[in-house]
Amino acid sequence: MKNKGTKQKTKKKGSENAFGCDLIEHLQNSGQDVPQVLKKCAEFIEKHGIVDGIYRLSGVTSNIQRLRYSYHTFLKICNN
């Protein structure tokens, strides 16, 4: 694997952070077979989404980053 620079991401331990970490390690740490963020997103889409191709199309990067931030902020609020 190529090193894309000297800047390294810090990886959080535990089951909260599903982004930027090894998927297998995350699932082992969380004791789940599917990350919670995927379960919650799929539940929401199935309940509210009526968009053709929703599972096939990539999202806009700025929207993805905003949603990731919002999700982690929500987790922090719920866990306190």
Image: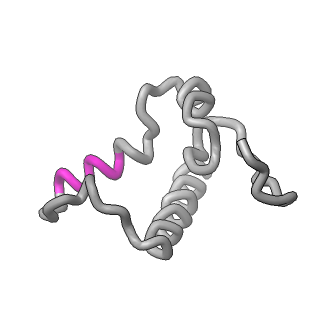
Left or right: residue 58 versus residue 14 is left
Above or below residue 21? Residue 7 is: below
Who's the residue at 63% across and 49% down the image? Answer: 20
The quadrant in which the N terminus is found is top right
Q: Nearer the viewer, residue 34 or 60?
A: 60
Most foreground residue, 9 or 1: 1
Predominant SS of the magenta segment: helix
Above-or-below relation of 45 to 18: below
Q: How many labels does the image show?
A: 0
| Residue appearing at x 59%, y 33% in the figure | 26
**Which stretch did the figure color magenta?**
40-47
Rendered view: 14 above or below 41: above
Residue at 43% across / 26% down in the picture?
A: 33
**Residue that sits furthest to the front in the current view:** 2
| Residue 2 location (% of width, % of height) | 74, 47
In the image, is residue 34 part of the stretch drawn in magenta? no
Give the residue at the far right of this rendering.
6
Reply above or below: 50 against 16. Answer: below
Q: What residue sits 34% from the left and 52% below the top? A: 41
| Residue 34 location (% of width, % of height) | 41, 33
Question: What colour scheme has been applied to the protein in the rendered image?
Answer: one colour
Q: Position of residue 76 (x, y in %)?
A: 60, 55
Which x, y percent locates residue 44?
Answer: 26, 54
